[in-house]
Image: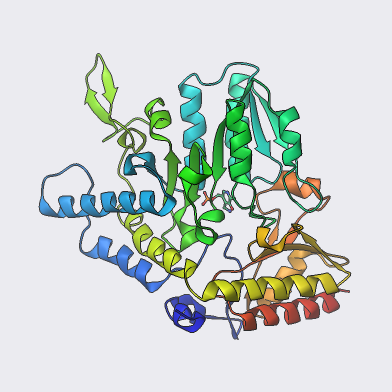
Amino acid sequence: MDVNSLRSQFPQLKESVYGKPLVYLDNAATSLRPLSVVQAWDEMSLKHNSNLHRAVHKTAVDATEKFEATRVAVADFIGASSPKEIVFTSGTTQSINLLAACLENAGFFSEGDEILIAESEHHSNIVPWQMVAARKGLKIKVLPVDNNGEILISRLPELLTPKTKICCVAQVSNVLGIINPVREICEICHANGTLFLVDGAQGVAHLTTDVLALGCDFYAFSGHKMFAAPGVGVLYGKKQLLDSLPPYMGGGEMIESVSWEKTTFAPVPGRFEAGTQNISGVPTLVPAIELCKQLKTSEIEKEQEKIKNLILEAFEKDPDITLHGNPVEREKKIPLFSISVKGAHHEDLSLILDKMGIATRSGQMCAEPLMDRFGVTGMLRASFAPYNTLEEANYFIECLQKAIKMLK
Ligand code: PMP
């Protein structure tokens, strides 16, 4: 597959903005959707719509089979031992909230316990833990990053104590684009008896994920950042850990038996999937996974490397640009770039780029503590996907330079 045939699968790339061809560089927020995903989505709504796991009629059985086949595909994609380790949610945010609430309900935390969170985390991997911490009297500790944005693993031994119950780190930072050494951190945490959660929201589409090799206890991600439908997400958990957790929400289909005297709950993962699930959205993970797999073995990966090098070199040459997230080894970064520009506000830059057809993100990117760490109120972010071209990367740099000149 080459980039042009890939682009032809994404109708939105043919759109224009203010009369300019759309250059979509906001992929870290949400990716565009290929026809295969839209077709799977439509097909579920137009042909197979029925509630899941309930009725015996053919349409219900078909819909349920598609839903459960997706669970198998997801387990295979991330290297889980069993589809039973895959819980469907509405996205990374719900996955992490579910986990935090279930651990709390399981009596996993006692007053004075600690939760360790990387300084570069998204609010979704901070706030749910702060909420539990406030309810249970826990202490949140921060695993810091250095000035390049790399996690200071050397600080782990002093931060981990017998009270550290869980450590939460993103596979890839949504601000810095840095691939964090989650496997190494996981090993150190496990040696301390600490559970380890990986937020895979940014990693799942860019990297090959193998949860068994990573060793993590839990892994969360969203469909909409990997070409699938929005409102679909996954929480992976090791089976024996999921088995030990009580439900998150009560309702239909998460039970084994209900009576006024006593209700018992379904085995995992059904126990965590109360109520009607995302019937049309979940099956879109199948074509999305198919595409992710194809991309990882295609020439397009090399194109992405070229884009990364081109942008990094352009930024290095410009003394007014500070790149946040500049690891010593370039391989530790995905093509996601957040910058500050001397004398130009990130939002003004993003608005000017928008008029040139380029969609970028500006602001705090749901990582306010990281903005504080770097002493900025926000950043400008350009995040590339495999359908972005070298030509678009060059156009971005050219337009950014024009925008900077206009604001100076
Ligand atoms: N974690 C990271 C690293 C993210 O980039 C995002 C989305 N920006 C989230 C969590 C939250 O994902 P969602 O909004 O799909 O729940």
| Picture coordinates of residue 174, whole percent (x, y) | 63, 54
The outermost residue toward the left is: 57
Q: Quadrant of the N terminus?
A: bottom left
Q: How many marks?
A: 0
Q: Quadrant of the C terminus?
A: bottom right
User: How is this picture coloured?
Assistant: rainbow
* Residue 147 versus residue 196 in the image, above or below: below
| Picture coordinates of residue 204, whole percent (x, y) | 51, 55
| Picture coordinates of residue 126, whole percent (x, y) | 63, 38
- Front residue of 148 and 408: 148
Is 16 left or right of 284, judged from the image as shown? right
**Residue under the point 63% across and 62% down:** 334
The answer to which image quadrant residue 314 occupies is bottom right
**Residue under the point 26% across and 35% down:** 253
Is 136 left or right of 36, judged from the image as shown? right
Tell me, yes or no, if residue 293 can be seen here. Answer: yes
* Residue 33 versus residue 263 in the image, above or below: below
**Residue under the point 37% across and 66% down:** 37
The answer to which image quadrant residue 116 occupies is top right
Tell me, yes or no, if residue 166 can be seen here. Answer: no
| Picture coordinates of residue 135, whole percent (x, y) | 59, 22
